[in-house]
């Protein structure tokens, strides 16, 4: 099957195991991907983002796998997804869980991976520029990097991003290739979106409708989207589909640089957006859980103004700058999806993030309602 | 009836078909400890993948899904094989790690009424 994939002598040597078992595993993984997707060569990457950090998501089997390749070393800038614990207040988390988490983090750190513990690497300095080839896992960050930054990455799985980080290369396939980034469907948005949660709902709805077709979104004459709105839109699309890039007419870098003429056309309006809010409407109360994807400083400062109980999640970088109060608590390093929320006594929540709503319900069995941020403000201040 | 597909991780197995036209989320949508589909509202919610030939269009959602597929295998709850109409890195590497045969077959609806199939190299054969 390897008829198309050309490997250099050095790459062949790694594949044959001459540079050790770990590098052999990594090269085998990349070569397998290259073969599956018909790549002709491997190309250098400038950074990687690795997912699969919390014991809650990778389980005992994930840890066992990591132990096997623990002596590997990464060869490019590599950052890490959120872990399951706030490392500055471990005492609030179940003891065994913390122990397992510490071992996972030690393994990753031993490989030379920076324990950034955030799903928004682009907010803490792993920030690729336009056209840069990277190999990232973390679906929301992949969509953001491709769509908003114009960097190039496929939606790698945790292990394949790790393999790319070790070798410093990825097969040239999919979204690495310019033509594969072209939109197939023009999406006319027939309603004014003016809440971040609605952008998440738009993304979630689009993902369901399009499954794997790349959208060019036309918002009409709406104002420029904020970074936070892009974050929600991308996380929503990533949750309900395998689409890993979108374009917004007149706004995202690739749509600004060239003419895009997708052949299909669909419309999406208030009804589709509302349906998403109905899909996640199981709770009346509970704390307001925010920060999926991890908060920007701007969001964190805003969330402080909410009254009522707020649980916020951000990178350590952001969390360490923001003051807490009696009702406003901000966790660093972790998030509501990958920490053992249920075991910590939380059974129902409200959230403005559709991605968080989906995973809290399906991964943790928590009752969730998706709410607009402005509703949350009113309700809580009410 | 026999169809040609693209083997991602080849193998030879015979088994009962579990068919869906809805994409699957492995992390959060499948429980490796029981082998059951847990995604709320999914048409296969509550059904077990264990020992089945899972036929589905694609995988959506989390990039941790590769580990979940591997976890299904470790817990002895994995499908016998998987057939998807579009593969992606998350399922491809999950299948390779778990050594679960995976085929890419664009026209999965041709398998909608199949109860049992045999998979061998690049071939899918309906036998029941």
Image (spheres, coloured by chain):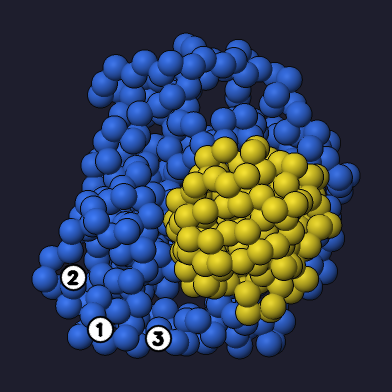
Chain colours: A blue, B yellow
Residue closer to the observer: A206 or B34? B34
User: On what subunit does the disc labeled 2 rest?
Assistant: A
* Mark 2 secondary-structure assignment: helix
* Whether labels 1 and 2 share one chain: yes
- Asked where in the image residue A29 lies, by quadrant, the reply is bottom left
Residue at point 23%, 42% (across, down): A131
The span from disc 1 to disc 3 (Cα, nearest Å) is 16 Å
Which of labels 3 and 2 is toward the front? 2
- Residue linked to disc 1: A17
Residue A11 image label: 2
Q: Residues within 10 Å of mark 3 (few under 14, many from 20)?
A: some
Quick check: A179 above or below B49? above
Q: Quadrant of the C terminus of chain A?
A: top right
Q: Residues within 10 Å of mark 2 (few under 14, many from 20)?
A: some
* Mark 1 secondary-structure assignment: loop
Quick check: A94 above or below B127? below
- Relative placement, left or right, of B21 versus B122 is right
Quick check: A66 above or below A268? below
Which of labels 1 and 3 is toward the front? 1
User: On what subunit does the disc labeled 1 rest?
Assistant: A
The span from disc 1 to disc 2 (Cα, nearest Å) is 10 Å
- Residue linked to disc 3: A70
The span from disc 3 to disc 2 (Cα, nearest Å) is 21 Å
Give residue A156's position: percent from left, percent from top.
Answer: 43, 56
Residue at point 83%, 57% (across, down): B46
Q: Residues within 10 Å of mark 1 (few under 14, many from 20)?
A: some
User: Mark 3 vs mark 2: which is more N-terminal?
Assistant: 2
Give residue B5's position: percent from left, percent from top.
Answer: 49, 48
- Relative placement, left or right, of B91 versus A269 is left
User: On what subunit does the disc labeled 3 rest?
Assistant: A
Residue closer to the observer: A179 or A190? A179
Q: Is residue B15 shown to the viewer in this render?
A: yes
């Amino acid at each position: 099957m390897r008829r198309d994939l050309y490997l250099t002598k050095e790459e062949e040597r790694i594949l044959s195991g001459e540079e050790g078992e770990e590098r052999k595993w990594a090269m085998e993984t990349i070569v397998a991907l290259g073969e599956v997707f018909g790549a002709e060569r491997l190309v250098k990457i400038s950074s990687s983002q690795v997912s699969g950090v919390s014991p809650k998501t990778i389980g005992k089997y994930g840890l066992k796998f990591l132990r096997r390749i623990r002596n590997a070393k990464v060869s490019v800038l590599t950052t890490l997804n959120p872990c399951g614990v706030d490392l500055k207040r471990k005492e609030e988390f179940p003891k065994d869980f913390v122990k397992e988490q510490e071992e996972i983090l030690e393994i990753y750190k031993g490989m030379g991976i920076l324990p950034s513990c955030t799903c928004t690497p682009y907010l803490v300095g792993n920030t690729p520029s336009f056209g840069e080839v990277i190999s990232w896992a973390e679906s929301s960050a992949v969509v953001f990097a491709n769509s908003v930054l114009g960097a190039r990455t496929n939606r790698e799985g945790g292990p394949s991003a790790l393999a790319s980080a070790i070798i410093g290369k990825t097969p040239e396939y999919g979204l690495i290739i310019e033509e594969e980034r072209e939109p197939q469907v023009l999406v006319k948005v027939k309603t004014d979106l003016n809440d971040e949660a609605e952008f998440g709902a738009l993304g979630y709805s689009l993902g369901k409708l399009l499954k794997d077709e790349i959208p060019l979104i036309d918002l009409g004459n709406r104002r420029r989207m904020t970074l936070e709105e892009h974050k929600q839109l991308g996380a929503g699309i990533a949750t309900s589909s395998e689409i890993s890039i979108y374009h917004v007419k007149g706004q995202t870098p690739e749509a600004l640089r060239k003419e895009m003429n997708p052949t299909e056309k669909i419309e999406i309006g208030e009804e589709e957006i509302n349906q998403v809010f109905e899909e996640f409407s199981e709770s009346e109360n509970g704390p307001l859980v925010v920060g999926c994807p991890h908060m920007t400083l701007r969001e964190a400062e805003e969330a402080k103004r909410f009254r009522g109980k707020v649980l916020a999640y951000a990178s350590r970088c952001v969390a360490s700058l923001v003051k807490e109060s009696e009702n406003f608590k901000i966790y660093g390093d972790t998030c509501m999806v990958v920490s053992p929320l249920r075991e910590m006594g939380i059974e129902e929540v409200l959230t403005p993030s559709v991605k968080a709503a989906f995973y809290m319900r399906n991964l943790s069995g928590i009752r969730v309602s998706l709410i607009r941020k402005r509703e949350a403000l009113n309700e809580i201040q009410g | 009836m026999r169809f040609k597909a693209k083997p991602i991780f080849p193998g030879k197995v015979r088994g009962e078909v579990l068919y869906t036209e809805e994409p699957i989320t492995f992390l959060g949508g499948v429980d490796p400890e029981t082998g059951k589909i847990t995604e709320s509202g999914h048409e296969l919610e509550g059904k077990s993948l264990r020992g089945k030939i899972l036929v589905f269009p694609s995988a959506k959602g989390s990039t941790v899904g590769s580990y979940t597929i591997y976890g299904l295998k470790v817990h002895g709850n994995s499908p016998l094989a998987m057939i998807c109409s579009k593969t992606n890195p998350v399922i491809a590497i999950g299948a390779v790690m778990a050594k679960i045969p995976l085929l890419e077959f664009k026209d999965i609806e041709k398998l909608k009424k199949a109860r049992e199939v045999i998979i061998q190299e690049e071939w899918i054969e309906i036998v029941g």
